[in-house]
Image (cartoon, grey):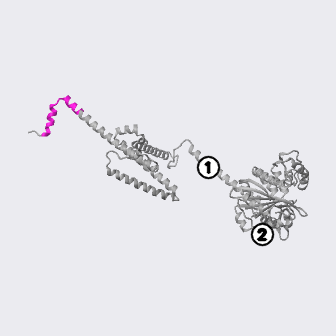
Amino acid sequence: MRSDKYKNREIRTSLSDDSWEETQLLFQNRDREKDALRRREEYEQRRQRDEVYQEYLAMRQNPDANRSPEHDVRSRAGRSAAYDARSREADLRAQENRRKREAAQMNDPNRNRHEARHNSDFERDRQAARARMEREAYANDEYAKERIKKKEPILNQQPDRYEKKEQRQSKEKKSREYEEYQRIRREEARAQGKHKAKKLKGRDRDDGRSRKKGGFKKVIALILLLIAVIAVGGFLLMNSMMTKVGDLELDKSDLGIDPVVAEQMSGYRNIALLGVDARDMSDYDNCRTDAIIIMSIDNENKEIRQLSVYRDTYLYIDEQYGYNKITNVHSNAGTAATIRTLNKNMDMNIEEVALINWKVVADTVDGLGGIEVDVLESEISEMNKYIPDTAANIGGPADLITAPGVQTLNGNQAVTYARIRKDSAQGDYRRNERMKIVLSATIDKAKHTNPIKLNKIANTVLPQIKTNMTNTDMMSVMMSLVTKDMTGSAGWPFTVTGWSSNAWYGVPDTLETNVVQLHEQYFGQPGYTPTDTVDEISRNISYKTGIY
């Protein structure tokens, strides 16, 4: 008896060839339909998971948004009630944890850093989810791949993993080929004996560009060497120039600087420039100061200001000389007393001083080729009156001014312009302004002058100057003049009342008020309180003059 397993074989042999082919085709169509249905179901499940994940991401990004019920995450077909309950519990726990985390972050001083880390973690999770969905979609499933390209383009943003692998293999192949090329070239070089056997760096160029690169480095090194030599030479030149300046001995402990003022003014370097009417710098002890300019260097803001003190200002000198004009202090008590008077009456920290005569100004201006000054109509008659006098005292031409306006003044004209006391339009107070104009114009012209020419001027001018500054101090001042901007100037006292007692005096109205205004406006000290010394001097001046 035949076994049952041969029954089908008997049936198959009994069928015709056409019937057998139709049966096979029927079975194949049925299998394809099952496969297509299975793929559609799998794709629908993946799509549902992606929608749920996208809603979850939206909820994380904006958890407090008012969402309508139809936008909420709803349970899908086939999801059990237990799964829905667990999901709701997980959502509640996530919301509670999020509230706690946000409350902690509000009090965290490193909040910004934590937020940046949280955002980076979120971005990493999102990219990982996209990569996972991509792998599921592209793994041996051409039908899903076509569907995703049409309806889910977000999954097609990352390059295919097989494409990445091909690119990596291509790069590795090129690298191996280039290493082989280098090895062959090294062997050829050793065989020919033309080059040393060494590892080639970069591309093996035979067009001379490597040699050009080496030559370019040598040029840069040479330029840097020249800059260093010039810098050292300039330093030595400036140092040798500074040795020509005359020495002025001053005891800094005897300059009347209040310790509180020294601390408050530590950010400012104040230098007194005293213009004396001496004809010869070998004898300046009995000379009055025609010009008193305080050059204030603001180290923090990189600025320089000029503050000129009116020569007739009525101030306290000391117990011996009492109260007098500031211009008379130098001839009566000397340079140290002049600086001490400024420090005590103005709450200043002046420790450095430079004495110059008017011949220094004339020689400097002539050496620079003149300076540009805007001469007013009201100043011409006074200038022409005293230009011959200036030329007779310090030498040089006595050229007169012929017209008002911007013009180039020579040394004698610039000195006369700065010294004239009367102005038919603005009176004596214009004098301090003219001194600052001459000083600023001279500094600006020197900044753009050839160093060789400056050296020639220095040889003539510096021996006529006296200062208590060291060579290093003077070089730092010169660097400040070159690198910092001249941002402002003022005349002090700001408010003055004339008073006569055997002579005319400019009385600060009052001294205390003028000192407060000075420190608030020019030294960045709002609500400034003067020292007891200024307060006492101010009361005494008001009592003596009756000006309150």
Q: Nearer the viewer, residue 127 or 245?
A: 127
The span picked out in magenta is 4-25
User: What x and y, as percent, mark residue 179?
Assistant: 45, 46
Q: Tell me which residue sits at (35%, 47%) in the image.
A: 75
Instruction: Tell us which disc is closer to us: 2 or 1.
Output: 2
User: What x and y, as percent, mark residue 53?
Assistant: 40, 47
Q: Tell me which residue sits at (74%, 53%) in the image.
A: 486
Residue 536, disc: none
Kind of residue at badge 2: Asp
Report crowding for label 2: few under 14, some 14 to 19, many 20 or more residues within 10 A (C-alpha): few
Mark 2 residue element: helix
Q: Is residue 296 magenta?
A: no
Compared to residue 205, the image places residue 321 above or below, namely below
Q: Name the residue that disc number 1 marks.
A: 218
Q: Name the residue that disc number 2 marks.
A: 254
Kind of residue at badge 1: Lys
Residue 35 occupies which quadrant of the picture? Answer: top left
